[in-house]
Image (tube, rainbow, N blue to C red):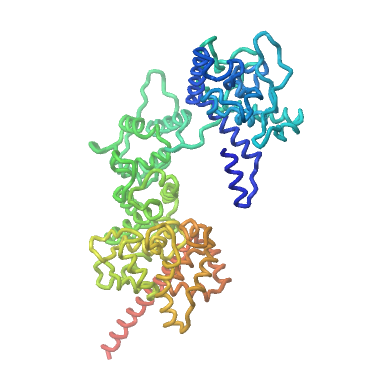
Amino acid sequence: IFFRFRFVMAQKRGRSLDIGLAKKKLNELFITWLTMPETQELVNGILARYEGDDNKSNADLGTPKDKGVPPPQICVQSDNGSLGGLDMRVSPPPLDALSPHSPIRHPHIAKLKVVDEWDRLRSKVASPPSSPKPGQGSPTTHPPAPLSPHGHKSHATHASMSPSNAAGTSKDMQASLEAIIPSSSSSGARSPTSPSRSQNGPLHCPPVEQPATASLIPQFWFPNGKELSKAEMEKESKTITAAFRVGPKTKAAKGAKPVFRTFKLQQGNDWVEFVSKVLGFPGWWANQIFTRLTKPSTEVTHKMFREWWDKEVAHLPKERRFFNFLKNDSSRDYLVKKDFEPFVQDLLNIHPGLEFLKQTPEFQEKYAETVVVRIFYTVNRCGNGKLTFKEYQRSRLQETMLLLDTEDDINNVTDFFSYEHFYVLYCKFWELDGDHDFYISKDDLLKYNNYSMTETIVDVIFQGVPRKMSSDQPGKMNYEDFIWFCLSEEDKTSDTSLEYWFRCVDLDRDGIISGYELDYFYAEQKKRMETFLTEQILFDDILCQMIDMINPQDPKYIRLSDIKVCPTSGIFFNVLFNLNKFIGFEQRDPFQAHAEKQGPERTDWDRFARIEYDRMAMEAEQSEEYSEGGAEAQEWGMGI
């Protein structure tokens, strides 16, 4: 019935249906169904009821017992053992029972529709012989071909199948069945999974065993990270013991106890080197590790360290070690922003590229806040402030933290920790915050990038549509909210940025951007173009360009998945609410744009931050020169 339905629907749609593939799928489905315990219980129950009804009375069937429709037979395979000890063939009923005018012999047998199932299996195995009766040899005659569903003639594929093709098809069928049912021994002995049946009892089939080949496939997915082998754990243990041992690293005399050293945080860089080279953690974590180990004391002994290491660290994969140590609370399985604050503060005290900030504690606080917000902006893909281990695994956070040990210039670590990036973000925020109360209003944000944003999109942002505002004052944007806005505005290629602006444009929250939503945002942009450019671009024309640019799967609407695969998705949003970038894209020099992308910067945000930092540094130098020149002129005038 299912096959006929698929065939009719394919004809109505004007498509061709792969009949061979459809039959193969049905055969696999039927074989899987036969191996289920529920199916075996159903067949056993039907056989038991059928035999009970036959023994009770043959008159209820309307015809003598020997002329009734026999039940489907699931029998033990012969010596060939092609099906692993369990014959999945359903023996066909006699031809006189298949006549459309013959009465139904038994209601349970009628429901099974064994003719259709046997027909499909027979077409795959090329009419296999029926099970031999006791006392007989291998049968030489084949059962008659079943009737075609369209008439009394046999199926064309049955008649045209050659012995060679039949053997090949039988081998394919055997291979597909052996993947589910283990094959029996070639000696003809009954396999452990072969069904057994008493003389008068129902068929009993034990559960199918797992194929032996499953144990040969190594584990390839590790939800908590790949665990260390015993050899690696032993190597780590010996390395730690050698680092604590005092004196030459030679084998101690028999009966002599080894002497171990103690670590103190004030002993130069010994503890830092031990943390970075022996334990594999970043060196700027040394203070936090020492504090957690020595809460009641001021030094780390070998015994104290081994107890902590063997209990909490040794059995964990490397990625899980980093994640668990960053957590301040072991009762939760996610990171929050407060977990990173003590680590970033230690980085400010240790890293040589941040020494100049020690004289300005207020900038240290803002730098630490910027680093933590950028980490959650990039790594916390859910945006709920709870960074899970899966998100940590997919990020480059661990590699970046380890890179800080070998990189003295903090600006070369552009992911999360660059001071130049912090400087650009903080100065941008300071320029918009006119009263310097560390809060930005709607009017302040409209000044961003020389009034490039439309009022419509600014209203949507302050309503908390793309992201819930973290500011404690309603209608205001704090520094954290501004970082999210600035990173999303200047780099519209990251997934976080695209999701940010997609939520802004998706007014009805239905997961798609339709024509009326595009018209709503483009209306103000059109008026601004008429004012500043003395020309206008009709919405119908711009709509065609945006559809061609995104090339969505369904031209009626645009989904987030369509935007993420588009390389120019940033221009799509600029057309709607950023006039300056839209005009800059239309008037760009393609050769210059290509040359800019060949630089060392990996993202649009890196390029923007470099350009803005150079501009701000030049303006600061000019301001200092002007102030020095004005003071000298004033002194010269007073002397006259």
Whether 224 is drawn above or below 141: the answer is below
Whether 477 is drawn above or below 133: the answer is below
Name the residue: 31% across, 85% down.
633
- Quadrant for the N terminus in the image: top right
Whether 266 is drawn above or below 576: the answer is above
Query: 358 or 147, which is in the foreground?
Result: 147
Name the residue: 30% across, 72% down.
444
Q: Residue furthest top?
A: 135
Q: Position of residue 313 (x, y in %)?
A: 37, 35
Query: 594 or 250, which is in the foreground?
Result: 594
Query: Could you tell whether 517 is left or right of 9 in the image?
Result: left
From where the camera sits, is residue 163 visible?
A: yes
Quarter residue 194 falls in: top right
Name the residue: 43% across, 50% down.
400
Query: 343 or 49, which is in the foreground?
Result: 49
From where the camera sits, is residue 351 visible?
A: no
Q: Position of residue 50 (x, y in %)?
A: 51, 18
- Quadrant for the C terminus in the image: bottom left
